[in-house]
Image (spheres, rainbow, N blue to C red):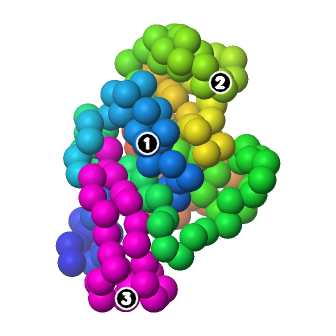
Amino acid sequence: MRERGDGVRRNCCRGRHTGFNVRSLAESLKYYHDTLGLEIAEVRTEGPNVYIDKLTCIQGVVQHWAKVRCTDGYLLELVEWVKPDFYVPDTLVPQSYNDLGINHICFQVDSVDEVHKLLVDADYACRQIQTDPPGRVKNFSGYDPDGNIVEFVEVLEQPVISIPSIWPGNNTATTPEWAANQTFDPNLRR
């Protein structure tokens, strides 16, 4: 465990990966690797074995999976279940931002315009490009082959935002003492 500057121990030091169940590993790799350019870190078939059964709490698991890597090292794990089969509806209903659970994954990119054109040219569904009202980021979202929302953000400017300016009440009386002199990195806003 590591300690924060205030002596409090923290258990999580950084995100490692996010896992998506997919209908077809091949189709998902076309999207994330072939089109978006994420590096393939590992591909394999897992199971049947004790390790994956214990991890998932499901007996007799067999799955094909791949991990694709962003340039900053973050991994996206794409999992196609072979056994047991998982429920796939007859009609794929794309995810909505207000669905329960993880509602989207977001990638920071150098050029939203280039990524949007790349995806549209490859016939993937994408919403229009927009700029947030303060003009700090330009973004759009679309869907991967399984209807998961994928957002792309280009940071236009990087102001330092103090916590009191965004805290409810906007005064130090409602701002926790530990936060009074902290700053936020705008890259973490979205």
What amino acid is at disc 1? Ala
Name which residue lies at 47% across and 58% down.
80
User: Which residue is denoted by mark 2 in the rendering?
Assistant: 126
Q: Residues within 10 Å of mark 3 (few under 14, many from 20)?
A: few
In front of the other: label 1 or label 3? 1
Percent across and percent down for residue 155 are 45, 23
Name which residue lies at 31% across and 38% down.
70
Name which residue lies at 50% across and 27% down.
153
What amino acid is at disc 3? Lys
User: Of 16 and 95, which appears nearest the observer?
Assistant: 95
Q: CA distance from mark 1 to mark 2?
A: 21 Å
Left or right, residue 130 beside residue 44:
right
User: Which residue is denoted by mark 1 in the rendering?
Assistant: 26
**Sequence order check, earlier mark of 1 and 3:** 1
Circles 2 and 3, Cβ within 8 Å, touching? The answer is no
Circles 1 and 3, Cβ within 8 Å, touching? The answer is no
**Sequence order check, earlier mark of 2 and 3:** 3
Left or right, residue 150 beside residue 161:
right
Residue 184 visible to the viewer: yes
The region drawn magenta spans 43-68
Circles 1 and 2, Cβ within 8 Å, touching? The answer is no
The secondary element bearing badge 1 is classed as helix
Percent across and percent down for residue 124 are 60, 25
Name which residue lies at 36% across and 33% down.
33
**Sequence order check, earlier mark of 1 and 2:** 1
User: Which residue is denoted by mark 3 in the rendering?
Assistant: 54
In front of the other: label 2 or label 3? 3
Residue 116 visible to the viewer: no
Instruction: Look at the image and say whether residue 48 sits in the magenta stretch.
Output: yes
